[in-house]
Image (tube, rainbow, N blue to C red):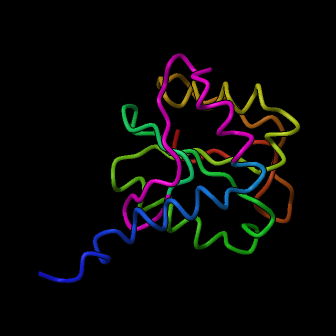
Amino acid sequence: MGPRHRLDRPTERARDLRNDATNAEQMLWRQLKRSRLQDLKFSRQMPIAGYFADFVCRSHKLIVELDGSQHVEGQPHDDARTVQLEAAGYRVVRFWNNDLTSNMPGVLETILNAAIGTERVPTPQPPPASGRGGSVVHGAI
């Protein structure tokens, strides 16, 4: 039998990610853990398809990802990540960090709509000409 620590790596990494959460992740987690979304249960930093998803509602196969300014350059990586997470059977919804401070009620409504399978809420603002952006960035919801 191999060393035990190899089995614990994803758990340890997830714990480290939770302990080093960004301000935006902490802000959204406070909302999600209070069961403000019709008793949906979310977990943080869950390993899925080789990635750590920011927030996961396993019962509704929903992943919520938060993107900071560093994600502008990481668009191809984020796209590949979303494809893998969707291939694992999850719906992915993404938000910019500043969406949480400027429109938390809209973020929570979009998450709830994605979880219960209602029609997608339109993006409030069109993305800037430079590519990705806008108030709410939707994955496959």
- Tell which of 127 and 57 is nearer to you: 57
Q: Which percent across, then down, holds residue 115? A: 49, 29
Is 80 left, or right, of 122 in this rendering?
left
Q: Which percent across, then down, holds residue 26? A: 71, 45
Residue at figure coordinates x 56%, y 64% from the top left = 16
Residue at figure coordinates x 39%, y 58% from the top left = 48
Q: Magenta stretch?
A: 26-52
Residue at figure coordinates x 61%, y 25% from the top left = 34
* Res. 10 image quadrant: bottom left
* Image: 92 above or below 120: below
- Tell which of 27 and 137 is nearer to you: 27
Q: Which percent across, then down, holds residue 106? A: 75, 28
* Image: 112 above or below 48: above
Q: Residue furthest top?
A: 38
Quadrant where the image shows the N terminus? bottom left
Does 64 appear in magenta? no
Is 96 left, or right, of 10 in this rendering?
right
Does 41 appear in magenta? yes
- Tell which of 45 and 106 is nearer to you: 45
Residue at figure coordinates x 49%, y 25% from the top left = 40
Q: Residue furthest left?
A: 1
Q: Residue furthest bottom?
A: 2
* Res. 28 image quadrant: top right
Is 132 left, or right, of 85 in this rendering?
right
Q: How many marks?
A: 0
